[in-house]
Structure formats: C-alpha cells, structure tokens
Image (cartoon, helix red, strand yellow):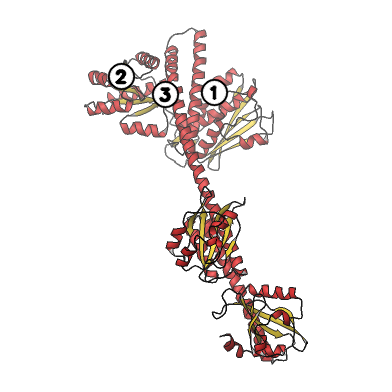
Amino acid sequence: MFRALARTSSTAELLVAADGEIYAANSSAARLLGCRTDHLAGENLRSWVASSEEKLEAVLRATMRTPSASPSALELRSADGETIECQLVGGRVKFDALPRERAVLLLRAKPKKSSGSPFSLLTQQVFELRGEVAKRRHAELLLEHQKGLLERIVGNHPLPDLLNAIARFIEDHSRHSLCSILLLSEDGKRLIFGAAPSLPASYSAAIDGIAIGPKVGSCGTAAYLGESVSVSDIATDPLWDDYKDLAAEHGLAACWSEPVKGPDGDVLATLAMYYRESDQPTVDDAYLTSIGVDLTAIAILSEKSRATLRYRAEQLTKADRRKDRFLAMLSHELRNPLAPIVNTLAILEAKNLDPDLRQHVERLDRQTTHLSRLVDDLLDISRITHGAMELKVERVDLRGCLTQATDSVRELIRDRQQELNLPDLAGPLWVDGDADRLRQVFANLLTNAAKYTPAGGAIEVEVGQSRGAVAVTIRDNGQGLTPEVRRHLFEPFSQGARSALDAREGLGLGLTLVKQLVESHGGSVEVRSAGIDTGSEFTVRLPASSNEAGVEATEAVHSEMKVAPLDVLVVEDNKDSAEALAMLLELWGHKPRVCFDGDSAVDQALEHLPDVLLVDLDLPGQDGYSVLTTLRQQGFSTENRLAVAMTGFGRLGDMQKTSAAGFHHHVTKPADPTLLREMLGEFSAKRNA
C-alpha cells in the first residue's frame, strides 16, 4: 500500500520506525538523497541527518504525537555529502504488513529551497494547513466534550452514568481502545466495577472485586503502586501471569492503566485503556488519559461530597428531631408543676388578702408568668424554624396590642423605677395579623428595653403611619449596642455584650422571635444604636390593612358573665394540679369531680355524665386520647358537651392530634385561669341559649 501511494507523490516519503529505522522510501526520497530506493530500506535515518541526533529525536517525538504533525526543520546529507535543508511533515501510521510491536512514522521531506513547480509548493502548503486545521478541530472537540462532562458532573448525575460517559469519551477520541474504570473499595483492598461500555460483560464481571497487589495485571498493580502501568503484550508480561488466559479469552492484547488520585494523593480508582493488538500508548493516548483521570477524580470526589452532605443532613435532621422531642418533653415536665402553682395563685387572688400578702402573691404571679413565657419562647422558636407556626390572621387594631403589651410589662418597669412614655393614639391602626403574636412582639421589645435600661431610665413608644405601613418605635436610653452586637442581635440565644456575672433573666430568644414573627406578618424590624451607653431604638413596620370593612374600632369588652353551674370532670394524675383546679372551679360556681387515671375517668364519666371533661393526655392506664375514644364507643356523646385536652405538649402536631381525637379545645399547661373561665362561660351561655 505504501509503495502504491508513494509512487504517485512528488514529495520525498519515508516509512520510519520510532527509533529511526527506514522500512521503505519512495523514488522522490531516493532522488533527494542521491541513492537508489532499495538502498534506503534497512538504513537508519540517523546516517542521513546532518543535524545533531538530539534534533532528530525531537523531530521523531513530535511526529509521534499526532497523525498530522507540524512541519519540523531538519538538515539531511545526501550521498555525495551535500547538506539539504528540509521540512519534515508526517505522523504516526499503522500498516498491517509491518511489525505490530514497532511504532511507525510516515515522514514527508520537502527541501526548503525547492526547485519544484509552484503548483507542487502550493500542494505542500495546503497539506500543512489541512494538518493544522485538523489539529485545531480535534482540540476544540475535546474541549467541548470535556465541558459537557463537567456540566453533567455539576448537574449531580448518578456516578455510574458519569463514569460510563467518561469511558465513552476516552473511546471516542482514542485509537480503537476499550476503556475501563474501576473504583477502589472502601477498605482500599479491592477494585469494584465502575464502567466499561465496550469491554465484554463477562470480562468485567470476572475482574469485579479483584484484590490489588504487586502482580495483579495492569489495574490491580497500578492501584497498589499508585503509578501508571503499561503492558504492551499481556501474553508475555509477568504482571499478567494469573490473568493472561482471561484476557486472551476476551481478545485483549495490551493494557495501560493509570491510577486516579484525590487531592491528598490517595488512590480512588483506576482508568485503563485496553487494546485488541499488542501496542504501546502514544503521546495522544497519554494526553487523553490524563483528561479522563481528572474527570473521573472530579466525578468521584463530587459524589463523595454529596454523600457526605446527605449523611450530615440526615444526622442534622435526626438531631433536630431529638431536639424537638427534648423541648416538647422539657416543656411538658415544666408545665406540669406550673399548672398547680398558677391555679393556686388564682385562688389566692380571688380571696380577700391583706395588702402585704397580696403583694407577695402578685410577685409570685409575675414570676410564674415569666417562667411560662420562657417555655413558650423555646417552643415558638422550634415551631417557626420548622414552618409550623400558625397565625390566626384577622383585622387587628394595633392600639389594643400595644395596650396589652404595656400592661404585661408595667410591673417590671415600675419595679425598676423607669419612666414609660406612651403616645396619645386618637384613631385606629389597622393591620392584618395575629393579635396575640403582635402583642408578644411588642411585649418582648418593651421587656428587652426595660432589662437593658438602668433604674431611673426612660422608655418611649412612638407610632406613625405612612406609605401603606404602620411603624412602631420603642426607644430607650439604656446600655446601647456595639456594631458587632447589632449584627448578631436577632440570632437565637444572642444576648448582647454581657458577662455571666451581668446576666439578666432570659434565654436570648425574645428578639429572635420578634424578627421571625414580624417577618411572618410581611413586616420588618430594624435596630439603631450609636454605641455603648447611648441607648437603643427598635422600629417595627407592618403593612397597613387593605380591608376597608369595619372601620370602627371593635375592641372586645369582657364583662362578668353569670353562667349556669357546670358539672366538670377533672382528669389529672398530678394530685396538686387536680385539686387546685377543682378548688378554682368551685370558686367560679361549678361542680367539679376529680379522678387521677384514665380507667376511673371512663367509669366516672359514664356514671355521672358530666357537662365538661378537662382531661390530661398523659395518664396512667388509658391516656387522654383513649379515654375520649372509649367513652364515645360506649355511647357517651360529646355533641352537647365540652371536651378539653389539657397537656404540657403544645406543638402544632399535638394540637392536630387532639382535634382528630374529638377534643373541642387544646389547652397548654399552665392554663390561663382567665381564658379557661371565659371558655367555660361561653360554652354555658351557648348551651343555655
């Protein structure tokens, strides 16, 4: 084939081995060198080179890299000793008639000062230009394919799909190679199948899980040594002694394996190129494999990072659930002893106490209310974080929320001998929101101002309305804030620049709740302070209500209701709490009965048919849910009765569960006596209407 092609070319062409041995030459090459064609065969190109042998080696290496290398300058010496300045163009070729173990080059030599025709010179230039264009197109195609693979890696495609795509990329751009990617096992002792789109499936299955070692083919050895291993003839190489029959069975003659390493140098996998014929990798193969190795490393590390993130996310989720369960249990355990305390205080307040004793009772009531609020704050943070905070949105006059908030902190401000300046609010301030939560926002801000303002200080509330928003500013002349503290002020458990010795009561959750509650209403909160001892200013902005209905103020007026006595069954395993609640019910004119477990609650209810069931959910024997279920199954109707679940668990899921069980209300301990009294009064009034 070579002779047929060479006879038609006016360019000197030589078929040369990588070591310089000439296999064949055309007549143009013989004329150029001044000898017969058959004289060149068997010679070494070194004997015809006038330049240094290092230059020839450089030319041969450059020509080995590509099927169409760039022109290289080289001086040849003719048979009569004349020096001929030439340009060599060519590349690696493959002829079946030539020895397969030798790399073969086709060199085209053209004198720089050629006496050939202009047409011949133009043909040579076109040939060279075509080679350059082909190289550039190939490089651009490689870059385009690499970009596509990187986009798939970033796109979180499954690792097997990515490895398969990388292997096909190698095969598409190599010299008829078959690509294989094997992953190192977690214990670092075995190679696990990753991808091999063109290798026989039976071969891939046979080497899947193979142990690495110093003589385990190309891949097992490369993973063991952490170095590339090239085997040009599997049948004769000792590294393949135990596996050459397997390779021969599947028609594999040569294999080059490269370890895939992570940033720390640890082996992650191997990438191998198999050949059907005995062969050595070329420079092009090395470049292509280096790309494949890098892409494989990125894909594996990305998958490991995603797996780590998934694991951490799962652990965080589990920790979050444990935290929620702990907070729920903590609130339950704290609320249970608070309930009898609150009820006992309500009983004492209803009696005619002397002023000194009443002062002590009021102090206990304030501190108990504060403790209950701390428990609520803990649970509110958990609810808001999980998006479980429910807002009862209605049209609200913000004046009522501010009045209730100031009333709740008035005792604290009075104890600290501070001055509270309130605006004269003439007209309503309508917003759409949850009145209880908005009251909580302003109570927290006023409490915060009182805590961080010294005795004798002043707190001022300012209200304005403009541009479709209502703004409430709470200003104090207290401790002030540094820029660093302001940046973290709304984070959970942040309490400003205070030492443990200066610690004031609180968990550092109040301002976190303020921010999250205001933002859940579509508003914003802003803090200003010029620095230490300059005071602080908090401004809450809320969207004004767009509802034009009901412009008149609709403040609810709670009058003393004369209600008919109700038969009430109190089911509570905490004896102190049950007896205190029963005494309170008697003071309100009702007729309570008490039982301390679920089984006796069922018996009492079926025997006396009470009007109201106040049932603790956590009971010995049957729990509160079972009590109501059992009663309904035995014909006890709750249609004209009131069933109230009383519990220390106050999460949204708990409330949904009690509603599904048939309870009409879910009251979180300690129950507010005023609210409980109103609930019973409303039920009695409705029942007797």
> Marks 3 and 1: CB-CB under 8 Å?
no
| Residue 117 vertical position relative to residue 498 in the rendered view, above or below | below
Circle 1: element type: helix
For marks 1 and 2, the one nearer the N-term is: 1
Circle 3: element type: loop
Q: Residues within 10 Å of mark 2 (few under 14, many from 20)?
A: many
Q: Which residue is mark 1?
A: 409
Residue drawn at (61%, 23%) of the image: 503
| Residue 337 vertical position relative to residue 448 in the rendered view, above or below | above
For marks 3 and 2, the one nearer the N-term is: 2
Q: Which residue is mark 3?
A: 669
Inspect the image, locate mark 2, and give the three-letter code of the amino acid beneath it: Leu
Inspect the image, locate mark 3, and give the three-letter code of the amino acid beneath it: Lys
Q: Which quadrant is the C terminus positioned in?
A: top left
Q: Which residue is mark 2?
A: 569
Q: Nearer the viewer, mark 3 or mark 1?
A: 3
